[in-house]
Amino acid sequence: MAERAVRSEKLDLRLTPTAKQTLQAAAEAAHKSVSEFVLDSALREAEEKLADRRVFVLGDADWDRFVEALDAPPRALDRLQRLFREPALFERDADREP
């Protein structure tokens, strides 16, 4: 049997009486508690909003350009090379006498 995650966090909401009635009716229609209904709905919406940050779809030509860019050797960036040559801010402070 799969273990259930322990729900230890709480989220409070302020809503209008009409909004509460709507959620209660929808939860009842879904045979869920209001908490289960709201949590399921909110998580589904959150996953949908975050999906484009985790998964993206490209056509064949765009995919080929994407793979080509990944396979290309890195470009030499003067500012980045200079950054690595110079001591870090904390390293400069550590070299000073108190």
Image (spheres, rainbow, N blue to C red):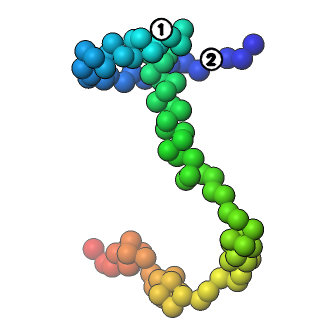
Q: In which quarter of the image is the C terminus?
A: bottom left
Residue 15 falls left or right of residue 30: left
Image point 39% across, 11% down: which residue?
24
What SS does tag 2 mark?
Answer: loop
Residue 21 falls left or right of residue 54: left
What crowding class fits label 2: few (fewer than 14 Cα within 10 Å), some (14-19), or many (20 or more)?
Answer: few
Q: Is residue 61 visible?
A: yes
In this orientation, which residue lies closer to the viewer: 30 or 86?
30
Q: Quadrant of residue 91?
A: bottom left
How far separated are the C-alphas under marks 2 and 1? 23 Å
Residue marked by disc 2:
4
Image point 68% across, 63% down: which residue?
58
Residue 34 falls left or right of residue 93: right
Q: Is residue 32 visible?
A: no
Residue marked by disc 1:
28
Residue 10: x %, y % from top left: 39, 21
What crowding class fits label 1: few (fewer than 14 Cα within 10 Å), some (14-19), or many (20 or more)?
Answer: few
